[in-house]
Amino acid sequence: MRNLITDVPGVYFGQADNHAIASGVSVVLFENPAIASVSIMGGAPGTRDTALLDPEMTVERIDAIALSGGSAFGLDAAGGVMAGLAQKGRGFQVGAIRVPIVPQAIIFDLLNGGDKSFASGQITSFHPYFDMGLRATQRAGKDMQLGSHGAGLGATLADLKGGLGSTSARLSNGYTVGAVAVVNAVGQVTMGQSRHFWAAPYEQNKEFGGHGLPASVTPAMLVPHMKGHAKGPLPEDGFIGQNTTIAVIATDAPLTKAQCKRLAHAAQDGLGRAIRPAHSPMDGDSVFAASTAKPNETPLDPAALAELCNLAADVLARAIARGVYLARALPFGEALTDYHSRFGP
């Protein structure tokens, strides 16, 4: 166990980024097609091919999940992932053709500095997100870089640099659950102006500093701090659609598609445990859940599924804090500071 989503058997991870545009792409790649579903609770999501993940839809298994910056421009990344999978002969069989199945979610990172000419109306044949999706797929393996890498490169919070985090845990029945999160929230993952993470009760082995909880929680810590506004409600022009945490929960526990949907819903609690506020009208909070178990395995019973759901929320909360803890500020004049620059180790 390396405390990564790739601890889950059958899960690989790849990413690519472009420092000139201050954005990137991350890909969760499954060794064999995985049963999957999704829960979308934010008010302004950006996604691709998520409708097919509803339990009543025909296609049960997917090849990969793409996570990307770039807002709607970043939805090109899934095409690049599909191209990389097609090179490997992967995809849903339709006659003589295979169609790779790659759902996707995006974050908004278009106002974080860097060269955003691709989003300025200039006509170009270069599509940075397609290219990054392809490269991320080609690089997929068991190693992961956390913090300001891949889809987390351009992520920001209300007051700190956001990032990409991952964690894992083992269930009592021996199965593994892992999470990866791209943290670009409208709010905070730390408590007020302190160094303490909201996710502190769930931390393992000082993975995000080991600072625990403060001696007391003051009323000031409970006041929402959000992008563009120090506290209280957002200004009238708002920051709609500019904030999102997107995540993937993976497990080798055998699940039906409906159970994956339940797991994705339950894992959303991890956002509530780690971010304040979460699931707001201004974000696109989305969580995918996938099982890499073999098709002939018996699905979990309700008690085992309940344990998995609870642990998945804890693992996701930890991944969110870890991603911010390991992030580093972008090299632009107006860039937000990172956790270490403000609070130290």
Image: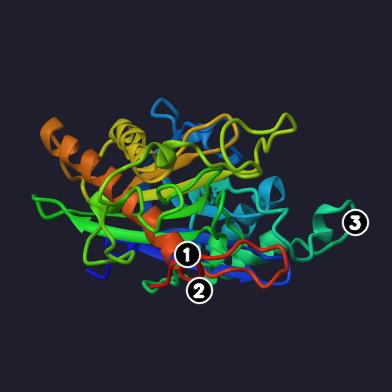
Q: Earlier in the sequence, mark 3 or mark 1?
A: 3
In the rendered image, the vertical position of residue 272 relative to residue 12, given as above or below = above
The residue furthest right is 122
Depth check, front residue: 308 or 93: 308
- Disc 3 to disc 1: CB gap under 8 Å: no
Q: Residue 80: percent from the left, percent from the top?
A: 63, 60
Q: Residue 205: percent from the left, percent from the top?
A: 21, 66
Q: Residue 191: percent from the left, percent from the top?
A: 40, 48
Kindly report the distance in space between the C-alpha atoms of the residues bearing marks 2 and 1. 28 Å
The label on residue 113 is none
What colour-coding does the image apply? rainbow
- What kind of element bears circle 1? helix
- Quadrant that contains the C terminus: bottom left
The label on residue 139 is 2
Residue 292 in view, yes or no? no
Q: Quadrant of residue 256?
A: top left
Kindly report the distance in space between the C-alpha atoms of the residues bearing marks 3 and 1. 38 Å
Amino acid on which disc 2 is placed: Arg
Q: Which residue is the site of mark 3? A: 123
In the rendered image, the vertical position of residue 340 relative to residue 290, given as above or below = below
How many residues crowd around disc 3 within 10 Å: few (fewer than 14), some, or many (20 or more)?
Answer: few
Q: Earlier in the sequence, mark 2 or mark 1?
A: 2
**Mark 2 or mark 1, whichever is nearer to me:** 1
Residue 125 in view, yes or no? yes
Kindly report the distance in space between the C-alpha atoms of the residues bearing marks 3 and 2. 29 Å
Residue drawn at (60%, 53%), measured in percent from left and top? 78
Q: Residue 144: percent from the left, percent from the top?
A: 41, 71
How many residues crowd around disc 1 within 10 Å: few (fewer than 14), some, or many (20 or more)?
Answer: many
In the rendered image, the vertical position of residue 21 relative to residue 216, given as above or below = below
Q: Which residue is the site of mark 1? A: 339
Residue drawn at (25%, 50%), measured in percent from left and top? 215
Q: Earlier in the sequence, mark 3 or mark 2?
A: 3
